[in-house]
Amino acid sequence: MVILNKIYTKTGDAGTTALSTGERRPKHDLRVSAYGTVDEANAAIGLARLYSGADPDLAELDAMLARIQNDLFDLGADLCTPDTGEKLEWEPLRIVDAQVDRLEGEIDRLNADLTTLRSFVLPGGTPAAAHLHLARTVIRRAERLMVELSMTPEETVSEPALKYANRVSDFLFVASRWANGKGKDEVLWVAGQNR
């Protein structure tokens, strides 16, 4: 259970923060950067939901985004609890394959409504789509940090967590197309157009 009754603790004033295990790390630590960037992606999805939640045509998409936002907190909790092999007093929250599978099903569901893409898409279009593109780039950065963390000696990132971050970016790409009139209103890249 999370209890937040005092927001400032002053424990981070010296440039460190605590992992869920109580271990203190510098705020620029790679693990902290990874879960901080997941949090940033979650906030970007929140901005997109200002538009998807207000548009009845995007209600299905908004429900999917709500689930992803919750899952991204799970991912942050997973990353905040390094798997050191030591026994903990509690069962740490981990991303599981079922979350990846659900996301793949939702990608397939939205993609079924889209026309075949024959060019790269320029980020933009409707406000919802533009914000989804931004969220996609942020989760890609989080994924890069997670991969780097997983390749760092004495650090671990679970395979489901890595897969989930990758699928979220795939989902956000498909969702941005879907939010752009199911692909009809997207702006396509024209190679060399302005030479």
Image (cartoon, helix red, strand yellow):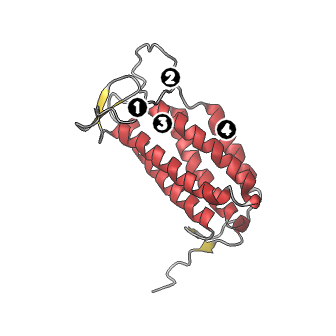
The foreground one among 15 and 124 is 15
27 vs 23: above or below: below
Secondary element at tag 1: loop
Res. 107 in view: no
The mark nearer the N terminus, 4 or 2, is: 2
The mark nearer the N terminus, 2 or 3, is: 3
Q: Position of residue 177 (x, y in %)?
A: 66, 63
For the residues marked 4 and 3, what is the alpha-carbon distance in whole angstroms?
19 Å
Secondary element at tag 4: helix
The mark nearer the N terminus, 1 or 2, is: 1
Q: What label sits on residue 101 in the rendered view?
A: 4
The mark nearer the N terminus, 4 or 3, is: 3
Instruction: Using the rendered view, name the quadrant where residue 54 is placed.
Output: bottom right
Residue beneath disc 2: 92
Is 114 on the left or on the right of 35, as rendered?
Answer: right
**Callout 3–callout 1 Cβ contact below 8 Å:** no
Outermost residue to the bottom? 195
For the residues marked 3 and 1, what is the alpha-carbon distance in whole angstroms?
21 Å
Secondary element at tag 3: helix
The mark nearer the N terminus, 3 or 1, is: 1
The residue under label 3 is which amino acid type? Gly
The residue under label 2 is which amino acid type? Pro
The foreground one among 24 and 78 is 24
Instruction: Using the rendered view, name the quadrant where residue 85 is placed.
Output: top left
Residue beneath disc 3: 76
The residue under label 1 is which amino acid type? Lys
Residue beneath disc 1: 6
